[in-house]
Amino acid sequence: MLRLAFDIAGSNSEGELVDCRVPVRRFDAPQLVRHIGRAVLIFLADEDGRLDFVASAVLGGIVPSSPESRGVVAELVEIVPFVRPVAHRGLPRAEGVPWISLPSAMFDAILDNAREEGRPTGLEEVGATTFAYDAPALPPLETFAALDRAVKRNYGHICALTGLSEAGQARYRVEDLQLAPIRPLPEDGPVHVTNCLVLAPAAAEAFAARHLTVAGDLSVIVDVSRIDPDLLEAINPIGRLAVPEDESLRPDPRHLAWHRRRFFSSLN
């Protein structure tokens, strides 16, 4: 199977080596979807046609660029910069297309060259990937009860998906908000406010079953073939997760990326 590499010069991060979204052609999506959850490379091109491979990453998903747009973007997450670029010339590129396919042998050779520079990428395959969790500087949460109270307080006792409160009166009624882990503890998820959402029971069940997930910009992605119609109707009209104003209390993008990979894998 061929492997992918993306040019992030035109991404929303403007070429910075951080989690980003790269606009891609809509009719390329079926080919790119097959690589969701797999390691990819990141390159930057110069005017002489040389491609400098500068990092490895994971293709987290192919999602709409916005709720109103027909455009799509590739989400690149868990980016690991190389110590030094690995340069190649003569690789074929289609004008205006921000990604290329590489033979597996070349893909592996680029990773090997990067390792020889003293920094392993750690991304041979996502299934073997681990990463260090750097928690924000928050007061310690020593018990699940304390975590439950803290997260519900941070979210204003409101379901992050539907926007309904415990006291809300609606056809889809929230009777008992739940603390929902984004990356479960058995999957190495941390006991921390940034790894939790406050959700209504049906929303928590759907999130755990991966009938829906959350994009890097907090927009909600649903599998309409599996999600409960009543829940779909109850999702926040703006189509985005409601999160605390304090960015240090919001979901960690790395945990959301982990959940997205599992969501898209379940579609295959």
Image (cartoon, grey):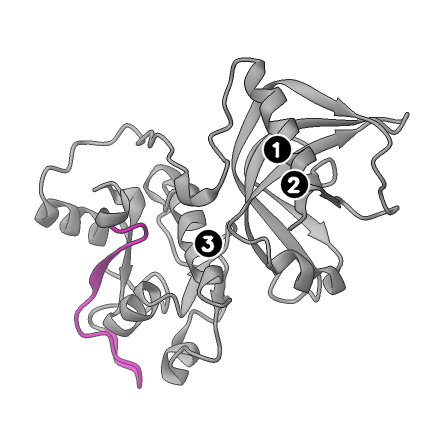
The image quadrant that residue 205 belongs to is bottom left
Residue 104 is marked as 2
User: Circles 2 and 1: CB distance less than 8 Å?
Assistant: yes
Q: Position of residue 24 (x, y in %)?
A: 72, 53
- What range is drawn magenta here? 168-184
**Mark 2 residue element:** helix
Q: Position of residue 38 (x, y in %)?
A: 53, 47
The answer to whether one can see residue 65 in this image is: no
State the CA–CA distance, disc 1 to disc 3.
Answer: 22 Å
Residue 108 is marked as 1
Would you name the residue on which mark 3 appears?
261
Instruction: Please name the residue shown 35% across and 30% down the image.
Output: 132
Instruction: Please name the residue shown 28% across and 74% down the image.
Output: 202
* Viewer-proximal residue among 124 and 14: 124
Task: Choose the circle earlier in sequence order: 3 or 2.
Answer: 2
**Mark 1 residue element:** helix
Numbered disc total: 3
| Type of the residue with mark 2 | Ser
State the CA–CA distance, disc 3 to disc 2.
Answer: 21 Å
Residue 38 is marked as none
| Type of the residue with mark 1 | Asp
Answer few, some or many: residues within 10 Å of disc 3's Cα (few below 14, many 20 plus, some between 14 and 19).
some
Q: Position of residue 154 (x, y in %)?
A: 26, 48
In the displayed structure, would residue 216 be above or below residue 163? above
Answer few, some or many: residues within 10 Å of disc 2's Cα (few below 14, many 20 plus, some between 14 and 19).
few
User: Closer to the camera: disc 3 or disc 2?
Assistant: 2
User: Circles 3 and 2: CB distance less than 8 Å?
Assistant: no
Residue lying farthest front? 105
The image quadrant that residue 142 belongs to is top left
In the displayed structure, would residue 240 be above or below residue 137? below
| Type of the residue with mark 3 | Arg
